[in-house]
Image (tube, rainbow, N blue to C red):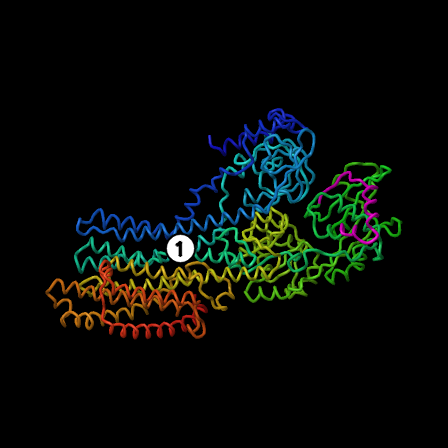
């Protein structure tokens, strides 16, 4: 029986058992475990940790480092080379150099990737250290806080809004408990939980059982209590590795699309080379070996290594710019993001807000309204928010410290109904010294107004008029239009009751309002302009009232011609929403589920969507977005759900991160496109030459050496400069434009290769071999010299033009004049050309079939390189005009 089946059978049965039965079965009680029982439970059921979790094993890290489309292709080519060049070759012709070079490329690239994986793990561990989780448990009848890893099966756990569920739990007591299970199911829906004992007729998937709460899920609102059933790797979360969604794997999809483009080219060109050589030379085994080297020559072998170097450099640079990339693959979505959804609080406005006015129903200052709100904020157990913080800050007002301290002694908390993102208010029951109970409610004006039947003015309770809504907004409307945040306060006497239910939240008495100043940040307008310049469309998704959102957005430059509220959104079909979401940039009065629906609609329209959030209500949308972005001041669960964490909640930081992400991918695309087109040109030249030359235009080992030397130089590309125009638009990481780039610039390389062939075959080689062409020679040694001179000449021409073309195709501008590569790229490529040219003058050149050429050949080479660069520049101009981009 599998672990998953065992888990299902052991845990699921408790959903159909009453709490006393579970306590007897596990050996615990309503008072919790004793110290001796804790030790016993830990020995029997294990620790609440993930040290043995599969995703953290060395095998998984090695798999990520070494297995990718490019490595698979190279490995297959290496095996075939090993068979043809070693096992099937004669002792005299046996040569494992080609296979060794291929396998070396895989090993070197994989090691670099593995190092980066370990560095990414280290970064994630540092982030985890910022998260100090404490769990409230009942042991020996006492409530205490313990570290989450000390939790054991049988513990009685208490949790509330904002907490992450620390283990798999059978709920025994709940109050309006809503949980997001996105961490284990990937679904954004928020589920309401209960503590009732289910009957066996209600057979559902274990994740849908309403009286079970699972580890790593997030409490959106309410509170709960329950018995721990499983911990650590025995939990549902610990028992499987949640696969990344397709949206989160956009990087891998892009890499696969590039690999398939290369495979298609190989599928066409390699058989052609094999057939031409086989038919003209008759040596089919030798022809197959050479065709194999052509396949390797066509591949950008160092692509995994260059990608890894780019990502490593990019992640370091982004770290310096206050941006932590938790998942390297998320950099693709970060760079290609064209829509950014965000809340306004803390992003466009300041993190903290100030209480400006506390007033009665007619707008007159009223301290009793503030007192009621203070009691509500002091005693509710939900997630603290800026409004609560602003209200509680009143206790530090000069001369008011004693008043608020006394207020808390006069009124004690009896019960509460926590904040709910659907109801949009919180209710607290307090009891005064005489035993009378008062229900105090504060929250969204419209939602509280719908629960009120009376108003209070100067101590007199009056029936609410029919046009009450209009009367209310005549008082607070001007403040809302000015961008102030306004909430309502209501109350009701409920005798001597000590508990309340949602049924009690009616027939309330409206007492007054609190108004808060929520001013835009000084940098907000500048940041929005910067995002638009980067062609990232900012969209505001907020739970605040429409008037407030409208005011703030107008001040910072976000289009607010159309505004959509949550109520209007619910009336729309998905098709209608997909159209409206393109035209609307401000969405107000939203619930967490409505935010998810908007993000989903944007994705379905083809956008790459980023979502910036920091609260528990943002977690479903963070999971739904292509790239989830949070901040280090966010709740722990939001940071866990995010792919990117900003060390400052400032759009300027986000802008810098986007720019660095795009720069990273631009440099990766440079390597892919330029290398692939250059390799294609070389292979096309080989096809042309193979049809007419009586010998190979370049040997297998020379093709591999050329690619290896060139790719080694390309490792420096992550440190190249990038033109500003290249990073002002989202980058597309795929093979969509690779084919057209290869077909546009590859043949230019072939054209000058053919010119070089003609010069070498009819002029240089005869001049150095007695004035005869290859077919006219009879001396075998002269024939070998002739072929070596030809192959060396083309080797140098290919190497020179490949390296120089880097400088011409890396930018749409005029190289060296309008756009200059970084000093490191210029120096490395220059040193590379000199070093590789000098190789042909050493004794080691003979190992690769190369030989020394006369110095006057380099005058021809400079001429060829000049006209090659000139024609490439002309082609670049027309290519950019046609496709509106180069790289």
Determine the secondary structure under disc 1: helix
Highlighted range, magenta: 391-418
Q: Position of residue 834 (x, y in %)?
A: 32, 67
Q: Residue at x 50, y 32 (%)?
A: 5
Give the percent coordinates (x, y) of residue 830.
36, 67
Q: Which residue is mark 1?
A: 305
360 horizontally vs 39: left or right: right
Residue 521, above or below 74: below
Q: Quadrant of residue 855?
A: bottom left
Q: Quadrant of residue 380?
A: top right
For the C terminus, the image quarter is: bottom left
Residue farthest front in this picture: 843
Q: Is residue 864 above or below residue 473?
A: below
Percent position (x, y) of residue 423? 71, 47
Residue 324 visible within the image: yes
Left/right placement of residue 748 relative to residue 213 reads left
């Amino acid at each position: 029986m599998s672990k998953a089946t065992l888990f299902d059978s052991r845990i699921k049965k408790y959903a159909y058992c009453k709490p006393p039965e579970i306590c007897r079965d596990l050996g615990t009680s309503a008072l919790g475990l004793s110290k001796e029982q804790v030790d016993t439970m830990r020995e029997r059921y294990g620790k609440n940790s993930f040290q043995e979790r599969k995703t953290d094993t060395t095998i998984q890290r090695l798999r990520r480092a070494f297995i990718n489309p490019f490595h698979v292709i190279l490995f297959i080519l290496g095996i075939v080379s090993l068979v043809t060049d070693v096992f099937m070759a004669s002792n005299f012709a046996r040569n494992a150099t080609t296979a060794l070079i291929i396998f070396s490329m895989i090993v070197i690239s994989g090691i670099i990737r593995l190092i980066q994986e370990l560095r990414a793990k280290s970064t994630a561990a540092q982030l985890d250290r910022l998260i100090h989780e404490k769990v409230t448990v009942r042991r020996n009848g006492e409530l205490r806080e313990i570290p989450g890893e000390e939790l054991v099966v049988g513990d009685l756990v208490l949790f509330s809004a904002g907490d992450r569920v620390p283990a798999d739990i059978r709920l025994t007591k709940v109050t309006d408990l809503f949980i997001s299970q996105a961490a284990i199911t990937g679904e954004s829906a928020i589920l309401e939980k209960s503590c009732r004992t289910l009957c066996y007729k209600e057979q559902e998937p274990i994740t849908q059982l309403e009286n079970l709460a699972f580890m790593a899920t997030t409490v959106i609102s309410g509170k709960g209590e329950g018995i721990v059933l499983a911990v650590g790797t025995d939990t549902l979360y610990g028992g499987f590795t949640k696969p990344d969604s397709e949206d989160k794997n956009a990087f891998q999809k892009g890499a696969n699309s590039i690999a398939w483009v290369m495979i298609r080219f190989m599928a066409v060109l390699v058989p052609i080379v094999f057939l031409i050589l086989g038919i003209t030379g008759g040596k089919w085994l030798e022809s197959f070996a050479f065709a194999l080297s052509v396949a390797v020559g066509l591949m950008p072998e160092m692509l995994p290594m260059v990608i890894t170097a780019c990502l490593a450099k990019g992640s370091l640079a982004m770290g310096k710019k206050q941006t932590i990339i938790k998942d390297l693959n998320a950099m693709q979505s970060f760079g290609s993001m064209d829509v950014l959804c965000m809340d306004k609080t803390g992003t466009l406005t300041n993190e903290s807000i100030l209480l400006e006015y506390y007033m009665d129903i007619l707008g007159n200052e009223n301290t009793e309204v503030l007192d009621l709100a203070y009691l509500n904020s002091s005693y509710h157990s939900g997630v603290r928010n800026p409004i609560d913080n602003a209200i509680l800050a009143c206790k530090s007002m000069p001369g008011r410290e004693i008043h608020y301290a006394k207020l808390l002694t006069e009124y004690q908390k009896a019960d509460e109904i926590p904040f709910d993102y659907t109801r949009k208010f919180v209710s607290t029951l307090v009891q005064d010294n005489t035993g009378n109970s008062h229900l105090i409610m504060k929250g969204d004006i419209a939602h509280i107004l719908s629960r009120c039947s009376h108003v209070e003015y100067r101590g007199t309770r009056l029936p609410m008029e029919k046009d009450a809504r209009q009367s209310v907004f005549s008082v607070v409307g001007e403040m809302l239009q000015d961008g102030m945040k306004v909430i309502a306060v209501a109350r009701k006497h409920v005798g001597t009751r000590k508990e309340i239910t949602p049924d009690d939240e009616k027939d309330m008495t409206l007492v007054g309002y609190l108004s808060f100043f929520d001013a835009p940040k000084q940098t907000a307008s500048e940041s929005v302009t910067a995002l638009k310049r980067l062609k990232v469309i900012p969209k505001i998704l907020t739970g605040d009232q429409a008037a407030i959102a409208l005011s703030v957005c107008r001040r910072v430059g976000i289009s607010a011609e159309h505004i959509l509220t949550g109520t209007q959104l619910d009336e729309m079909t998905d098709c209608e929403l997909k159209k409206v979401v393109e035209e609307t940039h401000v969405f107000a009065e939203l619930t967490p589920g409505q935010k998810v629906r908007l993000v989903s609609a944007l994705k379905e329209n083809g956008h790459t969507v980023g979502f910036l959030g920091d609260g528990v209500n943002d977690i479903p949308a963070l999971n739904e977005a292509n790239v989830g972005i949070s901040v280090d001041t966010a709740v722990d669960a939001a940071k866990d759900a995010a792919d990117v964490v900003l060390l400052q909640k400032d759009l300027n930081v986000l802008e810098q991160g986007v720019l660095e992400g795009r720069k990273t991918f631009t440099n990766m695309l440079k390597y892919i496109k330029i290398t692939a087109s250059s390799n294609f040109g070389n292979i096309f030249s080989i096809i042309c030459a193979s049809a007419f030359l009586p010998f190979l235009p370049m040997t297998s080992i020379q093709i591999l050496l050329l690619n290896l030397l060139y790719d080694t130089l390309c490792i420096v590309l992550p440190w190249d400069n990038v033109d500003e125009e290249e990073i002002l638009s989202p980058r597309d990481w795929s093979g969509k434009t690779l084919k057209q780039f290869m077909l546009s610039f590859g043949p230019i390389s072939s054209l000058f290769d053919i010119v070089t062939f003609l010069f070498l075959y009819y002029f240089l080689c005869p001049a150095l071999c007695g004035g005869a062409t290859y077919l006219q020679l009879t001396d075998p040694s002269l024939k070998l010299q002739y072929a070596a001179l030809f192959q060396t000449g083309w080797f140098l021409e290919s190497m020179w033009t490949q390296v120089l073309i880097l400088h011409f195709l890396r930018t749409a501008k005029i190289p060296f004049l309008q756009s200059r590569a970084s000093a490191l790229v210029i120096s490395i490529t220059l040193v590379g050309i000199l070093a590789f040219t000098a190789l042909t003058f050493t004794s080691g050149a003979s190992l690769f079939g190369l030989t020394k050429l006369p110095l006057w050949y380099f005058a021809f080479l400079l001429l060829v390189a000049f006209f090659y660069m000139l024609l490439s520049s002309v082609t670049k101009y027309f290519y950019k005009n046609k496709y509106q981009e180069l790289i």
